[in-house]
């Protein structure tokens, strides 16, 4: 149900390229998964068709994800949009085997393709693969694969490119809105000049909100990892540090680092109550470098220690 909820949120945000992985069960949940996948596919097809049929819009192909692989098939470079779509930090992708980004079925297809790539000096091909996100959604995509060789005939590199088909209507509306906003700011009315004594409150655009929400998802899915600097994190999301700080405060009522701490503590509380893992292991799994630091933060927030909560949970079971 968590994956279904995530799928609905993505569709509500206008992302129709995600899918839910099918299961072998035959129940109401599986029926719902099938319906959501069909709905997302139909909406995506409708949007693409409108791009062809409407002469007022231009059909465009956008590079959505790009991966540069070394001779061993490990990712050595990727674009920020790939990190956002997969809900991963760059450190979770770089230097890792490309196949770890795929579901098991596609891993087999990729290995067969990779063997063919290794045997040929130059090779261009397309392959349909299914990616998996940190939140367990899947993304079926046609990948364009190209090998590159240098003059010294050393082991080459491989570029994997994923194209997303779209129309540019949203981009046109965005540019128009920006022009109107800039014009309004340059030529304020006399009444506005008289009545404005303080700096007006910044208004977040739909695109700003989408990026900040994507940052929220990345944080929640990577609590065990160290968060990059806010500047680097903002660049990954396609925004700037100021908008990230301001937007996070507006949407979630707290700072980025405070939100990270609270999410770590919330997850650790659930693990203490409902698992038999050692407290030190839980502290490490939610991103705390030392147990004393974890214990102090836990006591400060919940007003009781992790040991006291574990003891209480064990007594309730008895």
Image: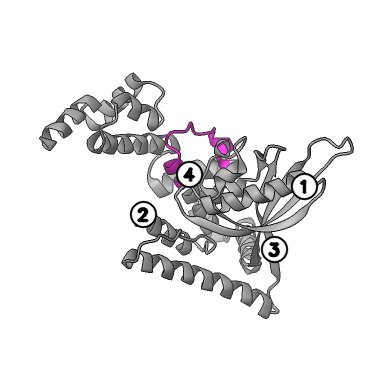
Q: Quadrant of the N terminus?
A: bottom left
Residue 255 makes an appearance in the image: yes
Residue at mark 2 to residue at mark 4: CA–CA distance: 15 Å
Residue at mark 2 to residue at mark 3: CA–CA distance: 31 Å
Residue 204 makes an appearance in the image: no
Of tags 2 and 3, the one toward the viewer is: 2
Of tags 2 and 4, the one toward the viewer is: 2
Of tags 1 and 2, the one toward the viewer is: 1
Q: Please, what secondary structure does the residue beneath circle 2 have?
A: helix
Q: Are marks 4 and 3 in contact (CB under 8 Å)?
A: no
Find the magenta span and give its range: 217-234
Residue at mark 4 to residue at mark 1: CA–CA distance: 31 Å
Image: 72 above or below 20: above
Residue 147 is labelled as: 1
Q: Earlier in the sequence, mark 1 or mark 3?
A: 3
Of tags 1 and 3, the one toward the viewer is: 1
Residue sitting at 54 percent across and 40 percent down?
Answer: 89
Closest to the observer, 22 or 39: 22
Image: 280 above or below 232: above
**Residue 193 x/y as whole percent:** 55, 55
The residue identified by callout 4 is 218
Q: Please, what secondary structure does the residue beneath circle 1 have?
A: strand
Closest to the observer, 199 or 273: 273
**Mark 3 burial class by Cα count in 10 Å: few <14, some 14-19, many 20+:** few
Q: Residue furthest right?
A: 151
Residue at mark 1 to residue at mark 2: CA–CA distance: 39 Å
The residue identified by callout 3 is 61
Q: Earlier in the sequence, mark 2 or mark 4?
A: 2
**Mark 4 burial class by Cα count in 10 Å: few <14, some 14-19, many 20+:** many
Q: Is residue 127 left or right of residue 297?
A: right
The residue identified by callout 2 is 2
Closest to the observer, 291 or 95: 95
């Amino acid at each position: 149900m968590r994956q279904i909820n995530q799928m609905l949120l993505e569709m509500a945000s206008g992302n129709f390229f995600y899918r839910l992985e099918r299961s072998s069960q035959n129940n109401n949940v599986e029926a719902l998964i099938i319906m959501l996948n069909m709905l997302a596919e139909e909406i995506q097809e409708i949007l693409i068709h409108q791009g062809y049929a409407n002469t007022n819009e231009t059909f465009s192909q956008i590079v959505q994800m790009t991966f540069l692989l070394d001779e061993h098939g490990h990712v050595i470079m990727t674009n920020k949009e790939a990190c956002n779509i997969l809900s991963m930090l760059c450190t979770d992708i770089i230097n890792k085997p490309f196949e770890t980004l795929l579901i098991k079925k596609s891993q087999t297809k990729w290995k067969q393709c990779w063997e063919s790539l290794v045997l040929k000096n130059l090779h261009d091909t397309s392959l349909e693969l299914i990616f998996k996100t940190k939140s367990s959604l899947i993304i079926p995509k046609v990948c364009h694969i190209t090998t590159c060789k240098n003059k010294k005939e050393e082991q080459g590199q491989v570029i994997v490119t994923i194209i997303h088909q779209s129309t540019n209507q949203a981009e046109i509306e965005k540019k128009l809105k920006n022009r109107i906003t800039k014009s309004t700011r340059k030529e304020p009315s006399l009444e506005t000049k008289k009545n404005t004594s303080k700096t007006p409150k910044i208004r977040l655009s739909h695109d700003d909100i989408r990026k900040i929400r994507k940052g929220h998802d990345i944080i929640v899915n990577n609590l065990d990892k160290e968060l990059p600097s806010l500047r680097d994190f903002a660049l990954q999301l396609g925004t700037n540090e100021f908008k990230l700080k301001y937007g996070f405060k507006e949407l979630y009522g707290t700072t980025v680092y405070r939100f990270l701490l609270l999410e770590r503590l919330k997850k650790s509380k659930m693990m203490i109550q409902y698992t038999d893992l050692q407290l030190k292991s839980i502290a490490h799994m939610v991103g705390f470098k030392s147990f004393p630091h974890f214990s102090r933060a836990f006591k400060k927030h919940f007003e009781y220690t992790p040991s006291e909560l574990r003891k209480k949970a064990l007594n309730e079971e008895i």
